[in-house]
Amino acid sequence: MTTALPTTSALETLRTVFGYDEFRGEQAAIIDSVVSGGDALVLMPTGAGKSLCYQVPALVRPGTGVVISPLIALMQDQVDALAALGVRAAFLNSTQSLDQRRDVEAAYVAGELDLLYLAPERLSVPSTLQLLDRGTIALFAIDEAHCVSSWGHDFRPDYLLLTVLGERWPDVPRIALTATATAATSSEIAHRLHLDRARRFVASFDRPNIEYRIVPKDNPRAQLLTLLRSEHEGDAGIVYCLSRKSVEETAAYLTKNGITALPYHAGLDAGVRAWNQARFLREPGLVMTATIAFGMGIDKPDVRFVAHLDLPKSVEGYYQETGRAGRDGAPATAWLAYGLADVVQQRRMIDGSEGDAAHRRRLGQHLDAMLALCETVECRRVQLLAYFGQDSEACGNCDTCTTQPQTWDGTIAAQKVLSAVVRLDQRGQRYGAGHIVDILLGNATPRVTQLDHTTLSVFGIGSELDAAGWRGVVRQLLARRLLAVSADGYGTLELTESSGDVLRGEREVALRTEAPTSARKRSSGSGRKAKGDEIPLDAAGEALFERLRGWRAATAKEAGLPAYVVFHDATLRQVAAEAPTTLDALAGVSGIGAGKLDKWGTSVLEVVAG
Ligand code: ADP
Ligand code: ZN
């Protein structure tokens, strides 16, 4: 046992092992609390530094920190990254051979592990519980704790097994961490994990370096390509699509257009998925096109953009996915293309989903909040943070702040759309948006003519807008539930309880003026946070930085590690700026702890010496 005060040894650990000078935000308070044996529930956005909150106490307290994580595919990477720091870490999951498991178990029992990562399903095996009894447990860390929430977007039934931790080991402190939590989700986490009395730490959820943009969907793949070519040439990024087919097609489309993109979805062979994930983490500038099966736990710091080609199902999901951009604090883009078809499709999916009426109602509420974010004329960030219960001011770094969308009085246009639905209904018919737009525009298509819809009183009354304009009106009416997708499964439209107010002229409808669909050219001022906290380098410094990056690439390749596990860009920049000549001086650079100094210090000095 150490005699030093916990806080002192925690800070010492931060400095010697991780090579950082100071704790950030609430880290010190959280770590203090856990080191002294208290339970904690930690809500912090991605990139804020959750890992240290359990890694440092695991090193300070006697015994092994047991980390419960659903990220089986990333455990090897996590353990490798800790090994690079000189931390003794291992994992137990279903991918290992019996021999590998035995080695890890023996190391744990012998007290030779600082951290042990466990997949939650291991806790259903009695031998795992008995094994844990045979060693000393410093703490339990429950990573991605929102997976216990049954109505969140990442529910894992195995997480319900975690109540055993508090029951069987009441004296071992537990720390649950997540980057996603509305008030409802965080109460559910506390309740399900029996952490009602745990100290709660809630960080600001703002990610100021991420620019949020939501654009009308036109030709989404072409829009994406324009965005990548004009603003993200050579950058690493993630493109989310709803379907597996769309994932594959988008990857092929980007690759054909000269941007290396890899697909990732649950239908691909496990080996292919693992290979694509490893390439994304290790090779610079790759684009991953994926379903939401990809991304949780990915800690690649330099993901420069996250693009959504389809509407996410909830704000929580959207925030979690976009949060994977810009973990390094440098400017990053969250871009979403969204259109009428998304609304129709999602409403249909909800109607067709399994579960009871209450479940469908909840899905509907999630979707409504997401649609409100898409249609807002206020700052996107203000609305996002408000969703997580946090107040803020207009950010200046989202599309509504920089382009200030206008509204127009869409009452008459809304009445025209709703009237068309009424007229069809009077004939006992329902149609989808495309047909209704044709009627309003007076397009005598074969279908319109054949159905005798040229004789409707609303035929041709909508010459003031073009087809895209009308689709925008329909979309906004759907988003506000002034119009609904019927439950017939064909995407036809019907009135809602509120439609009558509009038709009778008792309710005005202000609509958002549609922004042009092309990706905006970045004006020189818009990257205002660009390189904000980056250390400036002179020409010699830049040259040295590039040499250090070259050394890092070779070193990472040889060790089979992602480059950022060796050193982050920010660390190499500081080395380039200070050009240290001794190991002592090198140790003063942020991100260089004793382990890395020992492994790579001498080689770095050689590169600096030239
Ligand atoms: P999270 O799990 O919350 O998404 P991480 O734990 O991966 O975030 O931390 C994000 C990044 O910030 C990592 O590169 C980590 O090394 C760095 N970091 C965390 N805490 C500190 C600190 N106190 N000082 C400097 N860097 C830190
Ligand atoms: Zn804003």
Image (tube, rainbow, N blue to C red):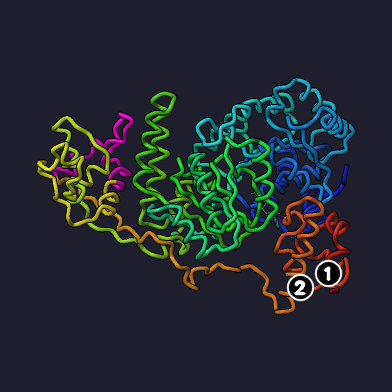
Query: From the Cβ of disc 2, is ligand 1 less than 8 Å away?
Result: no
Under mark 1, the amino acid is Val
414 in the magenta segment:
no
- Residue at 50% in and 65% down: 230
Total numbered labels placed on residues in the image = 2
Q: Quadrant of ligand 2?
A: bottom left
Q: Residue at x 75, y 54 (%)?
A: 565
In the picture provided, is 442 more to the left or to the right than 583? left
The residue where tag 2 is placed is 544
Q: Residues within 10 Å of mark 1 (few under 14, many from 20)?
A: some
Residue 139 makes an appearance in the image? no
Asked if the residues shown at circle 1 and circle 2 are in contact, with their CB atoms under 8 angstroms apart, the answer is: yes
Q: Nearer the viewer, residue 128 or 203?
A: 128
Q: Secondary structure at mark 2?
A: helix
Residue 454 lies, in percent from the top left, at 12, 43
Image location of residue 336, percent across then percent down: 45, 52
Q: Residue at x 70, y 32 (%)?
A: 119
Where residue 96 sits, quadrant-wise, is top right
Look at the image and give the residue range highlighted in magenta. Answer: 475-504
Q: Quadrant of residue 479?
A: top left
Residue 33 vertical position relative to residue 307 in the rendered view, above or below? above
Q: Badge 1 is on which residue?
A: 607
- Is residue 503 on the magenta stretch? yes
